[in-house]
């Protein structure tokens, strides 16, 4: 018998944090199996570019609380 996704989610949310993280990781990996390798390579290149910008001082990182506040402000929240 098939179980409702809502029931499964309710049970998953009751798990300890470490178990939820492992479950989330497994679910994410199951979605990535069919991912486009070209897209994965494009992301690798983008990450390399951004790290180089940080390392060279071309850009400056901001703390997460500030970044989050800016994003929420853009969304009007």
Image: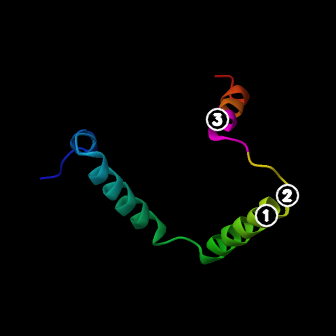
Q: Which residue is mark 2?
A: 57
> Is residue 23 placed above or below 44 in the rendered structure?
above
Q: Which residue is mark 1?
A: 55
Q: Nearer the viewer, mark 3 or mark 2?
A: 2
Q: Along the line of sight, which residue is nearer the eye, 5 or 22? A: 22
Label 1: element kind: helix
Label 3: element kind: helix
In the image, residue 41 lies at what x, y percent?
66, 75
Residue 56 drawn in magenta: no
> Is residue 75 placed above or below 32 in the rendered structure?
above
Residue at 70% of width from left, 65% of height from top? 47
Residue at 83% of width from left, 53% of height from top? 59
Which segment did they paint magenta? 62-68
Gap in angstroms between the C-alphas marked 2 and 1: 6 Å
Cβ atoms at labels 2 and 1 below 8 Å apart: yes
Q: Quadrant of the C terminus?
A: top right
Label 2: element kind: loop
Task: Please report whichever mark, 1 or 3, sits nearer to the chain's N-terminal start.
Answer: 1
Magenta span: predominant SS is: helix
Locate residue 50 relative to residue 34 in the image: left or right: right
Identify the disc placed on residue 68. 3
Residue at 27% of width from left, 39% of height from top? 6
């Amino acid at each position: 018998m098939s179980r409702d996704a809502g029931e499964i989610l309710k049970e998953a949310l009751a798990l300890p944090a470490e178990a939820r993280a492992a479950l989330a990781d497994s679910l994410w990996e199951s979605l990535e199996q069919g991912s486009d390798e070209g897209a994965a390579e494009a992301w690798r290149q983008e990450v390399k570019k951004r790290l180089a910008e940080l390392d060279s001082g071309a850009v400056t990182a901001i703390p997460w609380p500030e970044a989050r506040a800016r994003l929420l402000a853009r969304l009007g929240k």
